[in-house]
Amino acid sequence: MEKRVGDLGEFGLLDRLFTLVRRAEIPVGLGDDAAVLTVSPGRWLLVTTDTLVEEVHFRRAWASAWQVGYKALAVNLSDIAAMGGTPTYALISLAVPGSLSLSWVEDLYRGLEACAAQWGVRIVGGDTVAAASICLTVVLLGECEAGRVRTRGDGRAGDLLLVTGELGAAGAGLEELSAPAAACPPAARARVVARHLLPTPRLAEGRLLAAHPAVGAVIDLSDGLAQGVREIARASAVGAEIWSESLPLALATKEVAAAHGQDPLAWALYGGEDYELLFSVRPSAVAAVREELDRACGTPVRVIGCLLPPEAGLLVERAGERVPLARGGYDHFLQPGKNYG
């Protein structure tokens, strides 16, 4: 008979899970009341946290434990990327039913550790509690050179808006997982589902942007492009315009949209969970920034709009027409239970 979480108890479970992660060289670590970490001189400490809740952020019917673990850390890494930092340590708080199979929880930690190993992070502690459903919280620490961060509030009117990678694929993946379309090409389906389940944090890109003097505001796109633009505009006290024909939509996203009878632009603007970086750049430096990102990271970057004086508001241009940017993007308290991120 397979062991269950309840068979081990809280401390037995912690001991078991700690065997699945690499030990970090820190003064005091796993098993005490708090981890003790060394912070480098001349470096700033960055801290972020995010929570994944079953039936809100994921469903076990379509996401493996390994994928849930990997994604839980990856979405936190994206926050560190947006600040231009280097991730260092993570703490994991896990709430699970005692009846949950031990193998599921172990696979969750294997996914966490796989992501941690890929991006140079050490898991140094956490907590476990009993709960009616699965809830996973990651606290991630990072560091950056003192004084060298980019925030949402560093944009200014006249900047151009750029985005890394592609938009809309994660939203397409969620749509295909929620209601598979018989006409969806298998290769396109596989690509967008992977984008939804296993996001790639843009850490190297974020550090490069933070070091460039012509880069202004930076944000990671967890809740959709429209919400990211809105957050930059609010924090920077500016207006903004999105050029819809310039948005980077992958062929796979367009093919999935066609199979579902959907507009891929809606996924790019409001789908969320692409975890690309949206940032502003002084116009004279756009070519240099794009070239540097391509050379250092091999990452495509597209100009997708501009920042305007605050009185201009928030606009989207499509087919030569400029209209107000509708509100959208995921909000937990306006759309409970509909994320499955």
Image (cartoon, rainbow, N blue to C red):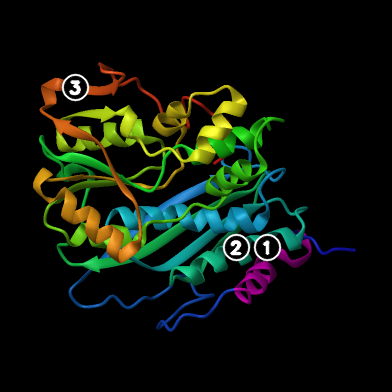
x and y, in percent, of residue 31 in the image:
54, 75
Residue found at x 69% / y 71%: 12
Instruction: Give the structural element (helix, strand or loop) at label 3.
Output: loop
Residue 308 relative to residue 12: left or right: left
Q: Can see residue 14?
A: yes
In the image, which disc is placed on residue 107?
Answer: 1
x and y, in percent, of residue 136 in the image:
56, 52
User: Mark 1 belongs to which amino acid?
Assistant: Asp
Residue found at x 16% / y 37%: 236
- Check disc 3 and report the residue beneath it: 313
Q: Main secondary structure of the magenta part?
A: helix
Instruction: Give the structural element (helix, strand or loop) at label 1.
Output: helix
Instruction: Give the structural element (helix, strand or loop) at label 2.
Output: helix
Query: Badge 3: few (under 14), some or many (20 or more) residues near its Cα, within 10 Å?
Result: some
User: Mark 3 belongs to which amino acid?
Assistant: Gly
- Pointer 2 and pointer 1: residues touching (CB < 8 Å)? yes
Q: Can see residue 124?
A: no
User: Mark 2 belongs to which amino acid?
Assistant: Gly
Earlier-in-chain disc, 3 versus 2: 2
x and y, in percent, of residue 5 in the image:
74, 60
